[in-house]
Amino acid sequence: MLLTCLLMTGTVAAYKGSLLSRGPVENFTAIDQNGDVYSFEDEAEGVVVVSFIFTRCPDVCPILTQLLIAVEAELTAEERADVTFVSISVDPEYDTPEVLKEYTDRMGASWPHLTGTNETMEHVWEMFGVMVQQNVIDVHVMDYQPGEASVTVVDTSNNTTQNMFGWSGWTATQLLAEEAGWELNISRSANVRYLSGINGVNAPEDGTWRWELNVWHEANTSWSPTTGDARNIDALETPHLALMPSNGNRSALNSPNESSATSLTVQWPNGTQQSQEFAAYNGYHLTRGALREAGIQAEIEKTDHERYVKSIDNQSAPEDRNWSWNLFEWDGADAQWELATVGMEGMIEPTHLAWAPSYTDASNIPHPSQQNNGDGTACNGHGWEMGSGSSKHCMCDAGYTWAEDDKLSCVSETTENYNVGHSTITLILNEDLEPTVAWTGDRWRVEDFTSDVRELLEKEQLGGNQGGMIPSLSFVLTSVAFAAAAARFGKLREAKKTE
């Protein structure tokens, strides 16, 4: 009887995503990337895949879109005819139809991307059980955030580390002085480094004065001397620095050009001043800053044309050029590493770089968002930290979110409401527009997601399943198990009759 019941009720669901139990989503209207009105109830037919994205998202959203394009490509023509893909913006103030049009064309996405007024979209998010983390979105929509940049290193044993970009006061001083051609005389005392001279102008041995590092405070437009080790200064938060004799005239220090990314001013003992600045970080700054922050030694040489890496962490490229250190840049749009076509200094404001031996297959270098550094204690062991200073926050694993207002903690999502910010949510709805399966983040496999779409198509008798049930693998295994059990039970009963 149980086997008969299974045949009558159809497929036994075996979803790989998170199973939901919700009522249907109400109809709503929004505007698609072509400026046309989109009625969800009228146009979302069959099995419906709904993702939540924002175009200013630099990493997760492009990867998610590419994953869904791959899912779409996996479906047969019959299946595709009964599957509707829809993406909904969680940043409607920026994501106008024109912006969404540029995004879909660049991504190669074929389906509607919806936006509208804040009031309209807030109602839509609420219906889908999506809680938009505007503070997370705000962190990620700035023009450029060097604190979230990283450098991945693949060594000769194929070990991989991802190193977040750091720009300490010491690193900034050294690299800006290098660009200005100033020679620094560095001394050590009790494991503390200090600057004893610049271009041969050394602090006197009698201690009459010393070279003093100052930081610029934008809030009150003033310079103040630093205390302690310059390595502890976050020069991403205070990017403008000045060196001067400790007995000099601080009030005479020139104000920095605050439109530059970072700068270093030197006030000489005679009162004259020189400044060095750069408008934007490049790949050389990123490489130096990330590796120095991680304590990784790198030998970088400069030719007449460009700089090149000779060794990383004491692993040198051989003189016979059997291999060399290659530079890769992360392509967020296509979610893959690309061999760099320009040198380090030609990369302006890069986000993620990778250094690897030239024999390394780029497809084997882990994606930036898939790497988890540290000892497992950061983010409660359910994510990894990104950024620095006040912008530092956790990149929580799928199924985890920030603990209330604590962006350095990751806790389990205990309800069917999903936070959307740096991570996101993709839902699969049945034919009645009931959210049935949820997939969080961008780390899922295309074949697993496609399997869930097909499972739901089969349950709804769509996508080529009409008029004849094609049993799923879970159903076949269950049927075989019950048939075997029935056979064994029959043999036992016959044996008892002959006793």
Image: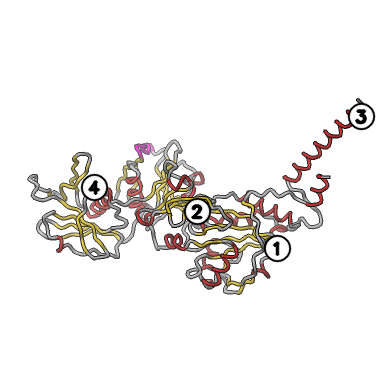
Tell me the tag on residue 497: 3
Amino acid, disc 1? Asp
Q: In this view, does 376 lie to the left or right of 192?
A: right
Query: How many residues crowd around disc 2 within 10 Å: few (fewer than 14), some, or many (20 or more)?
Result: many
Quarter of the rendering occupied by the C terminus: top right
- Which tag, 2 or 4, sits closer to the chain's start? 4
Q: Name the residue under label 2.
A: 401
- Which tag, 1 or 2, sits closer to the chain's start? 2
Quarter of the rendering occupied by the N terminus: top right
Q: Are marks 4 and 1 in contact (CB under 8 Å)?
A: no
Q: Is mark 3 on a helix, strand or loop?
A: helix
- Which tag, 3 or 1, sits closer to the chain's start? 1
Tell me the tag on residue 432: 1
Q: At 42% across and 50% down in the image, what residue appears? A: 385
User: Which range of residues does the magenta coloring cover?
Assistant: 313-320
Q: Is residue 442 left or right of residue 230?
A: right
Q: Residue 275 is drawn in which quadrant? A: bottom left
Residue 166: % across, % down: 34, 50
Whether 412 is drawn above or below 142: the answer is above
Q: Is residue 267 left or right of residue 217?
A: left
Q: What element carries label 1?
A: loop
Whether 28 is drawn above or below 154: the answer is below
